[in-house]
Amino acid sequence: MKNEILVGSMILFLLFAPLTKAAFAAESKKVCVKEFDSKTKKEKEVCKTIKVHKKLEGTEIPTKK
């Protein structure tokens, strides 16, 4: 009985594991900012790749009185 439950849960995990990773994957976005270098007295562009997550809608948490 325990073995059947274990096998069933493993099969369900293997079926739904790829869906959870795709649902919560973050998009990557390249952001560039111009900075002034005080040593060389020149302006240079610094670029970074950041992750942008989708904000999920939810209910507000009530404030305590």
Image (spheres, helix red, strand yellow):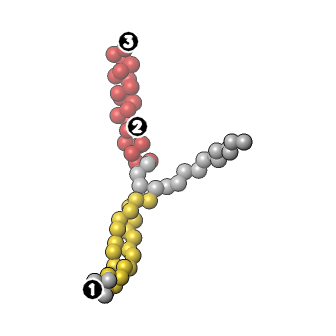
Residue 8 horizontal/vertical position (percent): 38, 23
Assign the C terminus to one quadrant of the image. Answer: top right
Q: How would you rate the neighbour count of disc 1 (Cα within 10 Å): few for under 14, some for 14-19, many for 20 or more?
A: few
| Mark closer to the observer (3, 1) | 1
- Which numbered disc, 3 or 2, marks the residue that appears first in the sequence? 3
What x and y, as percent, mark residue 46?
Answer: 33, 74
- On residue 62, which mark appears? none
The residue located at (37%, 42%) in the rendering is 18
Query: In this view, which residue lies farthest toward the bottom?
Result: 41
Is the residue marked by circle 2 packed among few (<14), some (14-19), or many (20+) residues within 10 Å? few
Seen in the picture, residue 12 relative to 17 is either above or below; the reply is: above
Query: Which residue position is annotated with label 3?
Result: 1
Amino acid type, residue under disc 1 in the picture: Thr
Identify which residue, 41 or 57, lies in the foreground.
41
Separation of residues labelled 2 and 1 (CA atoms): 54 Å
Q: Does 5 appear above or below 31?
A: above
The amino acid type, in three-letter code, at marker 2 is Phe
| CA separation in Å, label 3 and label 1 | 73 Å
Asked if labels 2 and 3 touch by Cβ distance under 8 angstroms, the answer is: no
The residue that appears at 31% across and 87% down in the rendered structure is 42
Task: Tell me the kind of residue under disc 3.
Answer: Met
* Helix, strand or loop under label 2: helix
Badge 1 is on which residue? Answer: 40
The answer to whether 1 appears left or right of 54 in the picture is left
Residue that label 2 marks: 16
- Sequence-wise, the earlier of marks 2 and 1 is 2
Seen as rendered, the residue at the extreme right is 65
Ranked by sequence position, the earlier of labels 3 and 1 is 3
At x 60%, y 47%, the residue is 58
